[in-house]
Amino acid sequence: MKTRNLLFVLVTVALLVSACGAPAAQPTAAPTSAPAPAQKFRIAVVMPSATTDMAFSQSMWNALQAVQKDMGGESAVELKYSENMFNVPDAAAAIRDYASQGFDIVIAHGSQYGSSVQEIAKDFPKVTFAWGTDVNTFGLPNVYAYTAAAEEGGYVNGVLAAKLTKSKIIGVTGPVEVGDAKTYIDGFVQGVTSVDSSIKVNKTWTGSFSDVALMTAAAKTHIAAGADELTGSSQSVVGSIGAAKDKGDVLWFGTQADQSSLAPNLVVSSQVYDWTGILKQMINDRKSGKLGGDKFTLQLKNDGLKIVYNSGFSLPADVKAAGDKAIAGIKDGSIKVNP
Amino acid sequence: MTNVISLAVIVGILTSAIRLATPYLFAAIGEAFAQTSGVVNLGVDGIMLVGAYAAFFVTLHTGNVWLGVLAAMIVGLLMGLLMSLISVTLKAEQGISGIGLYMFGLGLSSLLFKVTIGTVKTVTGFQPINIPLLSDIPAIGEIFFRQSLPVYAAFLLVPVAWWFLDKTTWGLRIKAVGQSPAAADSLGVSVDRVRYFSVCLGSVLAGLAGASLSIALVNLFQENLTAGQGFIAVALVYFGGWKPVGIMGGALLFSTVNAFQLWMQVLGVKIPSDVAVMLPYLLTIVALAVTVARVRQPAALNKPFERGES
Amino acid sequence: MQSDTTVNHSRLLRRINLNWMDIALQVALPVGAVLAALLIGAVMLVLLKANPLKAYATMITGVFGSVSGFTQSLVKATPLLLVGLGICIAFRASVINIGGEGQIILGAVIGTWFALTFRTWPGWLLLPLTLIVGFIAGAVWGFVPGILKARLAVNEILSTVMMNAIAQQFMNLMIRGPLIDPAGITAGTYLAQSERLPAQVWLPRLVPQTLLHAGAIIAVVLAIAVYIFLWRTTIGYRIRAVGLNPDASRYAGIPVPFYQALSLTLAGGFAGLAGVIEVIGVQHRLLDGISGGYGFTGIVAALFGGLHPLGLIPASWLFGSLLVGADMMQRAVQVPSALISTLLGLVVLFVIGSNLLSRRWAVRRMVAAAKAEEVKP
């Protein structure tokens, strides 16, 4: 059995290589390194989850598409993506592959890709690498680092939530207490406390970024415990929004992307990660010869973070004013939010 | 922490547990059928995913939850036929064909979702139905009699499955084929046909498990919605000793502890959340380890049948 | 005498002819299976408005025609081979190990903890000890289901599935707690990763500008060692005996539950080793997602390798190539990654399904050969 399998495996290889070696020459002869006539700007992005995750990856993908549209569409900007790259060596291969194909900017949109970027960027000094979410550019001249000060929007959402809650109990459904899930929620709690420290903020962590059913159960548990508002983060948080919708009167405060479409009457506000500012900065830098070296942080101040009020929800004017005041305070530095 | 365990909390935990147990009941009882006839199907999670997608898509576009249920059943049947073809007719190694089916189902459901829907949406699924009179009983009424139809169906499945396996000729055939296919074959029972039947029955139920998620419990679809619940369902078959009542016990134990740990977190009990999340898995192992009854598995489990071999 | 030699010659010729035909058909069927799956994949590609020729061509040339693609296949193959070796040992004792994910995690977490705790020790001591610690951690995680099965008849599918989930939560606890990267705290990012491991524990890279590391060599050496263990030692013989015929083994005095538990323990150890090698060879730190699905893909690789340690060496390389090639295809024609998983599932189903036809054909050829022998000219 063993020799037979070894043989079949080797013959498979031989057959495949010989069968496909010849015709392969033509399709790949289309050169990817020769410049296209209209000098397209080429951006590639590697993401750890799906472009449809309504959270981290989708926010970057939406931003890239918006930038592409602004710059003239597909004829001006070539955009390529690799999603669901949760296996880091696979992502490293993707990053290296795009870099070797001569892309202008390769975005490694996942904090776990750091060591990969550190190694690969050295081998491709002419390619701009952008890496998030972290603040480390490794001292390399062709690496940008970007992160989001999620705690800022968390604070604003917390203020709004504190003003709107009637039961004085708020539920937080989180995935794992790391990264911007943690910082967002820490900011949220600070925002709530700044308005009324007697409000109870209960937290649950499901231990997974993708378990929607458990997230739904967590949200329903909060509701049963008396929460009339919910917030949380990660792609699985759509489960919490669903639970809020089922109950019918539980308000939702979102982060990472605009989640109003999921519960048009109940989403109060979303902290939206708007990467377009950073992307445009990197593109302009590159056009003028700069390849990296900066750290970007999405903040309310630089419009990287936006608080999007849901037009479908009727927000009382005084509450909105409190929210806007918090935004202004963070922008001018008078309110400090600790991650 | 004064009212950590009050009646309201207990009611909340049990209500949650009943809901959480629903997909496990469908999928595990379905898998029990397949395994009783001798076929291990590790692809249950993949079948749940395509079933969830089909139910969601059809309900989203027709507004009719029953059409969604039908879609999930049809899709489950198709996946079951594929599994039967590979494992029964082609006599492939069952464990690995199950894993191949899982990869296929995971990929197909995500692909179809991305291409036909593209973004996460909610749908109006099965609504809770209060059973008249019974739902007014204090505490018990809220826990058991204010759930949605799929939840009731999942629990009704337990006695139905028991009756089918223990009290009908078909059930007898399934058990015979799983215990001693050669003997069954010599008595004129078509081993392959019975296995096809039980595997397909199991997959239809797995499809329903997926539908119970996407159009009743969470009312949405996302890539990898089940996040591995199908594998837990397969594990519960062993816990329950291939008996529907035992499986229900396992599903309820697992889900109750799960609901309990969520409550513990909400109430602010000071243990790390990761340890809390571990509890249902830990306690399921412990529970099985300490139960005294040793149930023997179907003798022909995981062994393809070829006439002329013993 | 002349007539006897002629008879012997022609008998020999007949045997050689039959063997070559036999092998050719044995190979053609799985190859045909892969091609059939890829054909369905081509249909799906066309439906997704992608060019299947370009897609498959990228796959082949990328993986067999470029240094980065080729080395990447070997990088993927390393954990596949290691996990697969463990699966092999377990399968030989008739035990299914689907606890690979959890065992990989334990090896990675405990190995990381060890290397960080003793970070001042010299490389020649720290590196091998870290590997051993990773192996032991995974082995413990395989031992628990093993002993539960042996002593308390707890089914190993149940216990390993549960232990996988427990391991994931254990890693969460460690990675956001004691093992969290202090740099993440000071920067306020709180990333789900450990500190970078000390350089002396990193496995050396074999080819510059690639991720290929010495772990690949370790894996191949271990494959040979496992072969020797299973076929040339008493313990190995007993493990195989238990798998082939548990009743006969029992009568022969071999304690079946003990050897099954042992095989699960070893399987866990190899998976744990895969985990710690991923950390010190590829990532140089512990990351969320380190298990990378190898607990399941390792099973597929093991079966493609005929459940034989030596067969696993080319099988893990080929399966790694398939995975890497599929990713390259995704990048070239920009199809959703879900297509890759669907395609891989189909490949697995078709190849496994073709086994019966291979076996039936082999039996038929053997029967024909035997009949031909009987007819003496």
Image: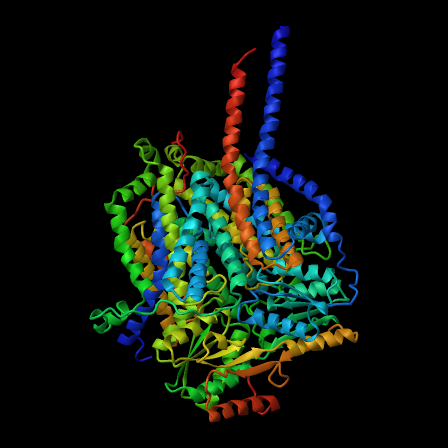
Check the image and name the residue furthest to the top. C1
Q: Quadrant of the N terminus of chain B?
A: bottom left
All told, the count of numbered labels is 0
* Relative to A132, residue B158 above or below: above
- Where residue B259 sits, quadrant-wise, is bottom left
Residue at the farthest front position: B62
* Residue C132 can be seen, yes or no: no
Describe residue B200's horizontal placement relative to residue C190 as left or right: left
Q: Residue at x 33, y 59 (%)?
A: B251
Residue A268 versus residue C256 in the image, above or below: below
B177 and C168: which is toward the camera:
B177
Name the residue at 70% across, 49% down.
C61
* Residue C325 image position (x, y, % from top left): 64, 51
Asked if one can make out residue A278 in the rendered structure from this viewpoint, the answer is: yes
Please report the residue visible at 49 percent of the width from the left and 68 percent of the height from the top: B120
In depth, the one of C300 and C286 nearer the eye is C300
Task: Identify the image quadrant of residue A301.
Answer: bottom right
- Residue A306, compared with residue C69, is above or below; it is below
Q: Report the side of B29 relative to A23 (left or right).
A: left
Q: Quadrant of the C terminus of chain B?
A: top left
Residue B255: x, y in percent?
Answer: 35, 63
Residue A12 lies, in percent from the top left, at 63, 40
Instruction: Give the x, y percent position of residue A87.
Output: 58, 59
